[in-house]
């Protein structure tokens, strides 16, 4: 251990603002990247599932009433 | 060998094999970065000249390493995409660019913050600093170029060419400290020669560097898998797969 107490550690021998801002920025960007990747993946999967459900739904409807209007089918995604 | 490369280039196969590798890289990244951080911040001895401000090295050097390595990886991916038309290479290149930009920013930011107590200035038009700033602009350029085309193929080719041309900057960054000896100190970390700093300072740095590389691999695999879902969303196997995922 290079420090004798927690306060000593936090003070970084007077260099606290420099050390902690550099480390905080790094941590922020690393965690932000992980969060972004997770969010991106979840959103894509949800989108694919929604599209899959809609298609199955339409397929079922198409079998039931073939003459029904298809005007609402346009896929915006 | 060729059969293997072609298989790896197939999105479906890549998606399956990367799922098996992924957890290992995430765990390795988390462990290495945690151990390296605690060791570097609390246990490594203070530098006899710089005191505790030298602890910035444990984020500065790994970030600067990754910033350059990611650009090289992007250029190599661009070359593979241009020559063999392997789509996975282009997807990976697109996904790693933002992380490369973030790493370049961390290297510049932590360097500036470190410069205040050490050099008495946060910025100087030193060769190393300037070439790193150019690297940041190159990353931004590659990302912007991708967004500037309506056709995906044109965007991919333009981004690949810019990465392949921009990679010239990497040896300039590397040798800038030897060619123009100005402000930035020469390399502290080398594969070929013995470390110039004591072991108990150098080992946590090595661990952090390895942790950052694992992080890069894990994040790029994760995001490339997402990109496969995005680009191949009309393929049947992607539809079936999305039905199973939660």
Image (tube, coloured by chain):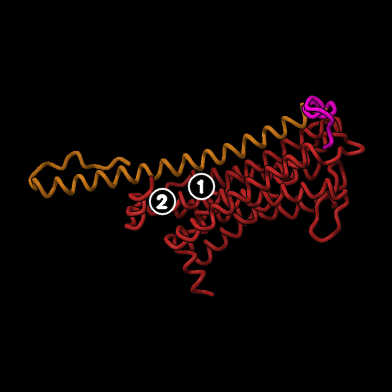
Relative to A75, is B177 on the left or the right? right
Comparing A2 with B169, the one in front is A2
Q: Secondary structure at mark 2?
A: helix
The chain drawn in red is B
- Inspect this view and state whether residue B148 appears: yes
Quadrant including the C terminus of chain B: top left
Relative to B17, is B26 on the left or the right? right
Instruction: Indicate the position of residue B203 as horizontal and vertical percent values.
Output: 79, 50
Q: Is residue B109 above or below residue B216?
A: above
User: Which residue is at 24% across, 42% downward?
Assistant: A74
User: Which residue is at 72% across, 34% downward?
Assistant: A22
**Residue at the disc numbered 2:** B229
Query: What colour do you see for chain A?
Result: orange
Q: Is residue B48 above or below residue B13?
A: above
Q: Is residue B198 magenta?
A: no
**Residue at the disc numbered 1:** B146
Comparing marks 1 and 2, which lies closer to the viewer?
2
Which portion, as a residue range, is magenta? A1-14
For disc 2, the neighbor class at 10 Å (few under 14, some 14 to 19, many from 20) is: many
User: Which residue is at 53% across, 62% downward?
Assistant: B82
């Amino acid at each position: 251990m290079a420090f004798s107490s927690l306060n000593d550690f936090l003070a970084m021998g007077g260099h606290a603002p420099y050390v902690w801002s550099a480390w905080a920025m790094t941590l922020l960007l690393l965690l932000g990247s992980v969060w972004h990747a997770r969010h991106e993946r979840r959103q894509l999967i949800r989108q694919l599932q929604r599209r899959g459900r809609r298609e199955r739904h339409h397929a079922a409807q198409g079998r039931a009433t073939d003459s029904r209007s298809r005007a609402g089918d346009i896929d915006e995604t | 060998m060729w059969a293997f490369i072609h298989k790896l280039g197939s999105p479906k196969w890549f998606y399956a094999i990367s799922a098996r590798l992924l957890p290992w890289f995430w765990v390795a990244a988390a462990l290495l970065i945690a151990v390296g951080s605690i060791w570097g911040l609390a246990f490594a001895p203070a530098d006899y000249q710089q005191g505790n401000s030298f602890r910035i090295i444990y984020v500065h050097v790994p970030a600067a390493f990754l910033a350059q390595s990611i650009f090289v990886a992007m250029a190599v991916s661009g070359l593979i995409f241009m020559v063999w038309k392997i789509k996975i290479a282009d997807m990976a290149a697109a996904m790693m660019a933002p992380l490369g930009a973030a790493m370049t920013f961390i290297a510049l930011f932590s360097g500036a913050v470190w410069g205040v107590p050490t050099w008495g200035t946060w910025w100087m038009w030193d060769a190393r600093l300037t070439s790193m700033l150019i690297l940041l602009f190159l990353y931004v350029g590659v990302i912007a170029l991708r967004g500037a085309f309506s056709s995906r193929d044109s965007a991919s080719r333009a981004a690949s060419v810019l990465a392949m041309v921009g990679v010239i900057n990497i040896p300039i960054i590397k040798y800038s400290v030897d060619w123009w000896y100005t402000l930035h100190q020469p390399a502290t970390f080398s594969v070929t020669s013995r470390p110039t700093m004591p072991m108990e300072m150098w080992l946590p740095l090595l661990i952090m560097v390895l942790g950052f590389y694992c992080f890069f691999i894990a994040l790029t695999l994760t995001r490339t898998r997402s990109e496969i879902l995005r680009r191949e969303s009309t393929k049947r196997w992607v539809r079936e797969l999305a039905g199973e995922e939660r």
